[in-house]
Image: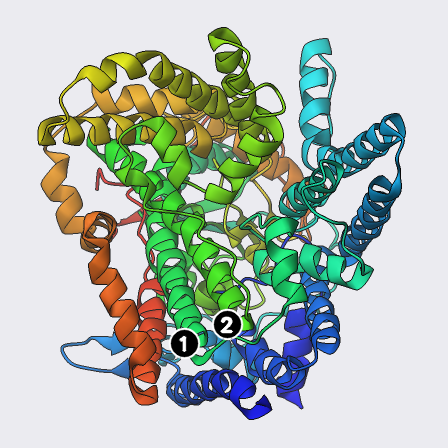
Amino acid sequence: MLQYRVKPLFSLVGLLLAAFVIFFALSLCRDGVPLWDGATLKTATFVRDLFGGDTSAPADTTATTTVDVGKAEQEQPEAAAAAPAVRQPMDTAPKTILFIGDSMLDGLQPRMAAYANHNGHKLYGVRWYSSTTEVWGSSTRLKQFIGKYKPDYVIICLGANELFVRDIKAKRQRYVDEMLRQIGTLPYIWIGPPNWREDTGINDMLAASCRKGSFYLSKNDKFERGKDGAHPTRASAAAWCDRVCRWIVNDSYYPIRLDTPDKKFGTSNGTEVLQPNQK
Amino acid sequence: MEFLNNILTMLTPTPGEPLMMSSGLFWVLMLVFLPALAVLQSQRRRMTLFVTAFSLLCAIKGSGVLALLMLLTAAMDWVTAQAIATCNDDRRRRVMLWASIACSVGLLVYFKYANFALATWHDIVGGNFEPLDIILPVGISFYTFRTVSYVVDVYHGKMRPVDSLLDYAFYLTFFPCMVAGPIVRAADFMPQLYNYKAASPRAVWDGLWQFMLGVVKKCVFADYIAQYVNIVYGSPSGYSGFELLVAVLGFSVQIYMDFAGYSDMAIGMGRVMGFDLGENFNLPYRSLNVTEFWRRWHISLSQWLRDYIYIPLGGNRKGKVRQHLNLLTTMLVGGIWHGANWNFVVWGAGHGIALCVHKVLMPRLKAIDNTRAVTIASGVVTFVVVSLLWVFFATPDVGTAWGIISGMVTRFDAAYIPVLVSRRPLLCVLLLLAAVSHYMPTRWLQRAREWFVAAPWWARLLVFIVMVQVVLQVASNDVQPFLYAGF
């Protein structure tokens, strides 16, 4: 009688176990099992998480590059948790600032340029429309721009296109890590995306990844939406930039001189624009 | 060793993040839970103790120490029900009943509505409101409904009080129903526990089939479509009327697949464990009127609202006007129960009004010949009403909801149709499949189920693997935002 009762459940357990073993075996191929015409059989990340987690960097970002990025290229970024929490003293020297990100720069960069002009900094902007951490982190663009402009301060505004990505940590963490690796030891600020609705974890992931005092959480700020419904209005973006600059001066890990400018908008020393599908 | 460490890390209580039955962690836990259940289920007490302990583990995972509230509620209501059953004084019985309801509902109100009430109050008096840091215990809405129905049923003599506190704790904490129902009544559940029989081989495979259907609904359809809906509803003014229309339709599909998917998983899991939790969704978008919709949608919730709110208010026994008022009140409660937000109030009121309108028009509607065209028109009208009301359900404020509804009309542009089809083929395929699966003859699905139950073991394994792989393939696809369509 007992045997009759337990048999079906054990049979089910056998099925679950057999399937688990198969998915475990498949998960050893981290980048999926290639099929035909570029199609890939995706593998289960949770199985990898169970057996030690996924700490690998994206394959295509380990390629060597001839771009000279100086000291930054040689060193790994400090892990957020291990980073010193002590705030650096105000660096009053004029800086070369590289400001990269998605289309949010349309609103932020003109105001940031006013700050740069007023405080003697140089500002170079790179707007990659529709870009994401995946787009940046799976290319060596950031490294190339660092090599080209030789900044001593980097500002990133990225994440607005990833507000609703599911399992974001599993999918995007490695790209964020790669971006921070490319920045190296340069002081940086990551401006979080302006949320219209609660995100699926991009802000938490960025906050945990960035060095303490290097991530500005924008989601609690109030914004006035532009007509496209996606971006803040020019005035709202300028106010956003003002808040970020005050935060850099008063609360960030590496404060630089950013006195409030007299002019509303300024001129950047250079701006590059990359289109959504540009490689 | 690392494997165990990782499991323990994943099981670390993270309030607000319940253990989902569609997760990989749940799958791994089942590899331990099911063999233990198989061994213990020949002795009911041991099985009860073991499953209750496992359910509490799930509750603690999702609510931390707040899970103990569930035990407290269980103990309190168990004692109260015993006292009500043995007391002969009507007045005292009534006082005990209302005290029990007040405690259960009071806890729910505090956790779910305190911030909403305070925010509304500060809005009225113009104060500066900082939300209280309140974490909602996982499943509190569902176990409050279960515990209230139990005490009320005992009060009305519809069931005997449960003799053992452990049995009652088993019922209240039963993990398949914990997160999202169904709201199984004690009167239906306890006899199954008292006369517990392990699931037959047929029931086990039938349960697995139902569980897999739920996973596909939730992880393939609902989660994928949700991405598009979130993006569009996140900034509706940036989208054309056609894209808004697809998002509105998408949300109707998403919310059904999400709720029904989780219910299927719970019912399937219950069946594997030897319990019949009933059906909770019966192809609701086939309804020809709103009244029928509520007989097919979240059936256990609809019946609960009917039996414990609508009928006690007087139901249809006190005249037409009172009946309509009762309907409206019941639906308002149903709306507020879903969440602390004015939009849920509007959603509930909208359904209440729709039900009243249907009741008023019923004599005239019955006079119309039931032709195929009338049937189709009725189905379409019902679907449109329900879908428009879902807009209020899905948006944070009435202004946004109204913006979406008006935008569908004022900004409609057919030029976006080919763009959407070419840019979002998977979304279109899933919406189409959802429609086909909903409206196809039910016997087709029944035949597939019968085949699976009778299939050889290796065939079932193959189906299971295909199902998991489909979930993996779709889950790894992100809907790319259309934010910068100008480029």
Q: Residue at label 2?
A: B272
Which of the two discs, 1 and 2, labels the residue nearer the N terminus? 1
| Disc 1 packing (10 Å; few <14; some 14–19; many ≥20) | some
Numbered label attached to residue B202: 1
Between marks 1 and 2 in the image, the one whose residue lies nearer the viewer: 1
The image quadrant that residue B238 belongs to is top left
Q: Residue at x 44, y 69 (%)?
A: B207
The quarter of the image holding the N terminus of chain A is bottom right
Horizontally, residue B301 falls left or right of residue A274, namely right
- Mark 1 to mark 2 CA distance (whole Å): 9 Å
Residue A97 drawn above or below residue B53: above
- Residue B325 percent coordinates (x, y): 53, 13
Residue nearest the observer in this picture, B414 or A139: B414
Q: Residue at x 13, y 77 (%)?
A: A37
Residue B388 drawn above or below residue B147: above
Marks 1 and 2: same chain?
A: yes
Mark 1 belongs to which amino acid?
Arg
Colour approach in the figure: rainbow
Q: Residue at x 49, y 32 (%)?
A: A114
Residue nearest the observer in this picture, A4 or A221: A4
The image quadrant that residue A142 belongs to is bottom left
